Image (cartoon, rainbow, N blue to C red):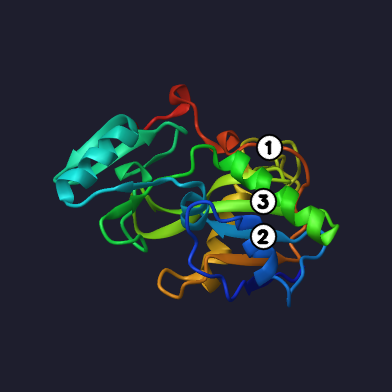
Amino acid sequence: MSIQIIPVMGLPDIRQGDDLGGVLIAALGSTPLLGSDVLVVTQKIVSKAEGAVRLAADDAAYRAVVEDESRMVLRRRGDLVISVTSHGFICANAGVDRSNAEDRTVVLLPRDPDESARGLRASLQREFGVEVAVIITDTFGRAWRRGLVDVAIGVAGMRPILDLRGTPDASGRILEATEVAVVDELAAAAELVMGKAEGIPAAIVRGYAYEAGTGSITDLLRPPGEDLFR
């Protein structure tokens, strides 16, 4: 299997009220989507289009927004907060981001990233006439490991987990616990061509044989009763 990762170039700065689907379609003009493509889009442009932006003139205001966006605070260290968001994500500062935001503002997570992904997918499929999947991503840290990676926070058109339980491995042993978070793998792969400072907030992943269907990003969230580390 050969996979291509194609950056979507030429996207303008996104502002509240912009038709993000239309903007993406215009940018994709020279690289139209093909059947079974996956379009990966960063949370930042989704949030900006949806108006998930707040004023925060200083550090105190920023911390207040973080508290407002935290359903539960799990850890504190100085100004760093590890919290549970209303979506159920566990992340730093409730996903409230000051990078690539206009002066004196912060960008929040979309209120319903799955719904945002479904809306974008519908627009793209009407335009290109093919079945595609959409993943919305954000940058998360990882317990016990340095460095950040992009992970999926919203998905439409594909199963978020590849469930290999009950299938044999290369030695014929039946797998009992293996579930692969393919949407996270695709999110991290797409980030390789998007970067943090290049201003490329979308990419096409082409050639990956994903399992089409419905699903929610909540399928990836471990229930508290299974969480040994909280």
Q: For residue 125, which quarter of the picture?
A: bottom right
4 in relation to 146, above or below: below
Q: Position of residue 213 (x, y in %)?
A: 77, 41
The foreground one among 172 and 152 is: 152
Question: In which quadrant of the rendered image does the C terminus lie?
Answer: top left
Q: For residue 24, which quarter of the picture?
A: bottom right
Q: Earlier in the sequence, mark 2 or mark 3?
A: 2
Q: Compute the Cα span from label 2 to label 3.
A: 9 Å
The foreground one among 224 and 73 is: 73
Which residue appears at 67% of the width and 45% of the height?
A: 119
Residue where numbered disc 2 is placed:
22
Residue where numbered disc 3 is placed:
120
Q: Amino acid at mark 3?
A: Leu
Element at label 1: loop
Q: Amino acid at mark 2?
A: Gly
Residue pushed farthest top?
Answer: 225
Can residue 180 be seen from the camera position used here? Answer: no
Which residue appears at 57% of the width and 45% of the height?
A: 154
Cβ atoms at labels 1 and 2 below 8 Å apart: no
Residue where numbered disc 1 is placed:
215
Task: Answer few, some or many: residues within 10 Å of disc 3's Cα (few below 14, many 20 plus, some between 14 and 19).
Answer: many
Eye-nearest disc, 2 or 3: 2
